[in-house]
Image: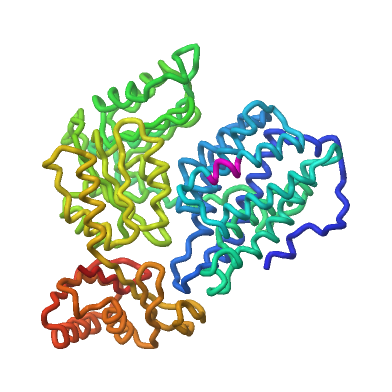
């Protein structure tokens, strides 16, 4: 796997004066190349999934994290390495998705710290920066696990740095890096038994290798697979300007977004408090999102007076980008009919004591969470992990002193925590719900009467221990896991990371999974029924439970989730 892109050990490297130093322009091009190489191979990384379920998203998470950094780089032009790295890191931290994406963003944040004093860097300085990247990546994980992207990064950097000499170039350093990265990746199954049992290497490590292969290809002037290394822009849907004509009245206002570079001759850029902006925006609009990263403020507001917003912000800096769209003709993910009319919106929002944010996939689950009192439901889940920036936007909309977050997926917890660290307007507590069942149990027990955030958090965490969550899905490959033989196309059932059932028939698989979960000793099972599930099959399953286990209350919810036709939450 991947060996065709590993530099030949005897390959001669053309040493030029330019190759002895890495500057901002070359770094930016290498990053674009890394993103392009990963994008070309993201599906392969997705398929390196321990469970043979169509929910692999590591490749997509790492790709979107990289592309968030590239988008930030594309907004500036600089030959200063420190500046280019800083812009990249800002974009990646905000765009980080999934555990692999967060670790990747932290690796580049450490690399940025290593480049902080360098307009350009030789191989020795780049090697030292790579070591900072490994250090920060490890620090971002409470309990680092070997056999993952962390190991691949650490072993490769150690090897590459150990080979640096006076004759080393940037190309020779990256060449050594990816040769050992490939070797380390092949060793990951020896460190993680789950990988060996599944017959795969670590997906995060593979994604990192692809990124570094892209770095190397740019250095040697090779074409990246798929052509241009820049981000492929999605085709924008056509705007229906007929929605706003000469006799129309402005109802929804303007969606106004901007990036503001704070300037020291106008304000103290480092010490600037973004509340200065948000407090003003509350007087002229709603749907406010504003946060500060370094010396850049990003904001979003729905307002009738975008000109006033621009005039106010220019007191403190100048714009890097501005986008203003009439929401009556704006075509994006928001349906115009669902937008609140501006004149009916409050001009200022009162800060609440407590607020909640939850992640959910499926219209039915999202609706249920709102009914249970969740303030903001972030769309996402398996294969659709929200970014840190998505969480930040939700925190701003909640507008509370204390915010409780329910990721409801083990692969989303790190992004939620990264956003919590970046958020400055309240205290965010991430309740580490690793699946839908844990999140549902915790959200169902929400009670703010005590007024004590720590006590509330403890109660929510305790509620999660009272449930077990089982999932049914379809296998995408043959495998043997946990003593269960699986054929491609089988319907499989598992709880957490334990594979329990594999059957050709989905109804039989569902029955067997419920029995493995100890249905005879349960009193309540809430079943979230997935998208396009056969109603007759749901009825048959309910009838089976009623006849065989009459003491068990079997409750179904039209969840509308993808990937998992059934999610059983057992109490």
Q: Which residue is drawn at 59% across and 57% down?
A: 205
Decide if residue 474 is in sight here.
yes
Count the marks: how many?
A: 0
Query: In which quadrant of the rendered view does residue 553 lie?
Result: bottom left
Closer to the camera in the image, 73 or 371: 371
Residue 369 place in picture, x, y as percent: 21, 55
**Vertical order, 436 against 451 (above or below):** below
- The main secondary structure of the magenta stretch is helix
The C terminus is located in which quarter?
Answer: bottom left
What range is drawn magenta here? 133-138
Decide if residue 250 is in sight here.
no
Q: Which residue is drawn at 62% across and 29% down?
A: 116
Residue 89 place in picture, x, y as percent: 54, 38
Residue 253 place in picture, x, y as percent: 28, 35
The N terminus is located in which quarter?
Answer: bottom right
> For this view, does 376 lie left or right of residue 81?
left
Colour mapping = rainbow
Queried whether the magenta region covers residue 137, the answer comes back as yes
Residue 417 place in picture, x, y as percent: 39, 44
**Vertical order, 162 against 385 (above or below):** above
């Amino acid at each position: 796997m991947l060996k065709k892109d590993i530099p030949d050990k005897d390959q001669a490297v053309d040493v030029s004066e330019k190759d002895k130093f890495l500057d901002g322009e070359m770094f930016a091009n290498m990053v674009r190349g890394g993103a392009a190489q990963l994008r070309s191979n993201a599906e392969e990384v997705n398929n390196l999934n321990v469970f043979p379920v169509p929910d692999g998203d590591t490749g997509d998470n790492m790709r979107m994290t990289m592309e968030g950094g590239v988008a930030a780089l594309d907004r500036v032009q600089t030959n200063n390495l420190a500046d280019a790295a800083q812009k990249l890191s800002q974009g990646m931290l905000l765009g980080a998705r999934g555990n692999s994406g967060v670790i990747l963003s932290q690796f580049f944040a450490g690399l940025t710290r290593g480049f902080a004093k360098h307009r350009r860097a030789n191989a020795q300085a780049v090697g030292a920066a790579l070591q900072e990247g490994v250090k920060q990546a490890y620090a971002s994980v409470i309990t680092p696990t070997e056999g993952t992207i962390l190991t691949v990064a650490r072993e490769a950097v150690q090897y590459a740095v150990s080979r640096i000499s006076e004759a080393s170039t940037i190309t020779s350093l990256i060449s050594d890096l990816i040769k050992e990265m490939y070797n380390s990746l092949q060793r990951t199954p020896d460190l993680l038994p789950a990988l060996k049992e599944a017959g795969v290497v670590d997906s995060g490590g593979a994604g990192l290798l692809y990124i570094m292969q892209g770095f190397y290809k740019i250095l040697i002037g090779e074409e990246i697979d798929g052509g241009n290394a820049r981000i492929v822009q999605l085709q924008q849907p056509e705007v229906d300007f007929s929605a706003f004509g000469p006799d129309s009245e402005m109802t929804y206002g303007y969606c106004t977004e901007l990036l503001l570079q704070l300037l020291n001759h106008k304000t103290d850029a480092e010490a600037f408090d973004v509340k200065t902006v948000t407090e003003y925006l509350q007087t002229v609009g709603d749907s406010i999102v504003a946060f500060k990263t370094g010396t850049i403020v990003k904001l979003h507001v729905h307002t009738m007076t975008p000109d006033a917003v621009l005039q106010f912000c220019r007191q403190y800096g100048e714009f890097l980008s501005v986008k203003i769209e009439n929401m009556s003709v704006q075509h994006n993910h928001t349906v115009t009919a669902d937008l609140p009319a501006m004149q009916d919106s409050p001009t200022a929002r009162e800060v609440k004591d407590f607020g909640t944010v939850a992640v959910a996939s499926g219209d039915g689950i999202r609706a249920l969470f709102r009914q249970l009192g969740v303030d903001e439901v972030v769309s996402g889940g398996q294969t659709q992990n929200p970014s840190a920036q998505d969480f930040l936007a939700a925190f701003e909309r909640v507008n509370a002193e204390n915010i409780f977050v329910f990721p409801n997926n083990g692969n989303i917890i790190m992004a939620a925590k990264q956003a919590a660290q970046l958020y400055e307007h309240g205290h965010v507590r991430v309740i580490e719900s690793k699946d839908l069942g844990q999140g549902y149990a915790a959200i169902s027990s929400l009670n703010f009467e005590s007024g004590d955030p720590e006590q509330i958090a403890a109660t929510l965490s305790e509620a999660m221990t009272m449930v077990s969550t089982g999932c049914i899905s379809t296998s995408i490959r043959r495998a043997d896991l946990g003593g269960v033989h699986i054929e491609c196309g089988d319907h499989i059932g598992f709880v957490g990371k334990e594979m329990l059932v594999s059957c050709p028939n989905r109804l039989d698989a569902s029955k067997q999974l419920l029995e493995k979960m100890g249905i005879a000793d349960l009193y309540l099972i809430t079943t979230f029924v997935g998208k396009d599930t056969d109603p007759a099959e749901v009825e048959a399953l309910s009838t089976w439970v009623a006849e065989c286990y009459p003491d068990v209350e079997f409750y179904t919810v039209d969840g509308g989730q993808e990937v998992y036709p059934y999610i059983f939450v057992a109490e």
